[in-house]
Structure formats: C-alpha cells, structure tokens
Image (tube, rainbow, N blue to C red):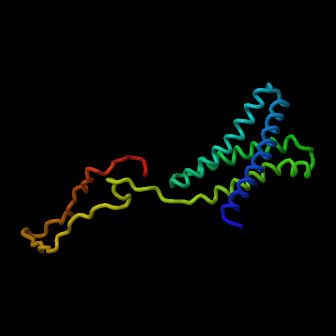
Amino acid sequence: MTERTESAIRLVILLAIAAMAGAAAFTHVHDLSVTHGQPDWIGWANAVAVELMTIYLGLELRARRRAGRPVGLVGSLLVAFALLSLAAQVAEAHPSVWGWVVAAVPSLAFLALVKVVLSNAPVTPPAVEPNQPDAYRYEEPEQATEVEPVRPTAPASPVVPAVLPPRAVPPNRPHVVGIIR
C-alpha cells in the first residue's frame, strides 16, 4: 500500500468518525437545550456553538503550537467545550453506567482522533524577525586591559565604591516595560 493510499484511507476514516460523532453531539446538545426550555432554533444554535467551538479551538491550538505561541488558555477552553459536549451526550443517555459509556463513545472517539491528528503538528520555534536582536543577547561593555594602581594621597580616607552609569540600550532594541517577549 502506498503512502498516498494510506493517507486517503485515514482521511476517509477521519471524516466518517467526525461526521457521525458530530451528528450525535449536535443532536444531544440540541435535545438537551430543548428539553430544558430553549426554543428549537436556540437548541440548534447551542449545538453549533459548542461543537464548532471545539473544532475551532483544536485548529487554533495547532496553529499556536506551530507558531511557538502559548497554548494554555486555548487548551483549557478546548477541554471545557469538549466536556460540555460530553456532558450533553451523557445527560441524554439511559441512567446507567453502560448507558453513559455508550452515549460518551462518539465524543470520546472524536476527541481521541483530534488528539492524534493534532499531535502530528510539528513544533517549530517562532521565526526571528530581521533587525531584531536575540532575546538574551546584549553587548558587553568594553573592559580596560590595563589597570593603574590607586595611590592614596590623603591619610586614611574612607573608600567609596564607584557607581557605574546604566548600560546604554541600543536604539533598534524594542523597549517594553512589564511584558516579557
């Protein structure tokens, strides 16, 4: 089997699981919303919001990883929306352990599949912009190679250490206060 054929089969399986899990999840969120007093159209709006937000957050997480940006908030939101979807599926199930497990299968299968697909995203460090210095690079002040000994001219005067002026910041370096880049 060629790599291209294998990729095509994997894509078909991914789309089939996504379609079935999506249909089940949309239906459960809709039905739960309607059961608890929401009009039919709001039930569908809730289903669209919860399920598509989960997909969007998964894609955003992948994009942020690729760009080397923080993923904490997006990952937390992804878990929260996935749990909302899972809760709606379990709430609509037969009130037994097996009823809950069977109701959770589509959502858990889809989450596992998303995790596998998103874990294949390469993590690359962000590109360094030209004309920008490295974050931890700074220029060392030039040091004198010869030091002349200090000869006291007055008897027993207290020694005061020299205070160095602050180091000059290069003009092309962005100066941001309070934010770590």
Q: Residue at x 22, y 56 (%)?
A: 165
As drawn, which residue projects farthest toward the left? 153
Q: Which residue sits at x=51%, y=53%?
A: 67
**Front residue (pair 17, 141):** 17
Above or below, 91 against 173 in this view is above
From the viewer's perspective, tell me whether residue 111 is left or right of residue 123.
Answer: right
Where residue 22 sits, quadrant-wise, is top right
Task: Spot the residue most to the top.
Answer: 39
Q: Which quadrant of the figure contains the N terminus? A: bottom right
Give the side of residue 41 with respect to residue 100, left or right.
Answer: left
Q: Is residue 30 above or below residue 181?
A: above
Mark count: 0
User: x, y percentage for residue 144?
Assistant: 17, 70
Q: Position of residue 91 (x, y in %)?
A: 85, 41
Residue 104, x across and y down, in percent = 83, 49
Question: x, y (%) of residue 181?
Answer: 43, 52
Q: Name the foreground residue: 76 vs 143.
A: 76
Residue at image point 13% right, 69% down: 156
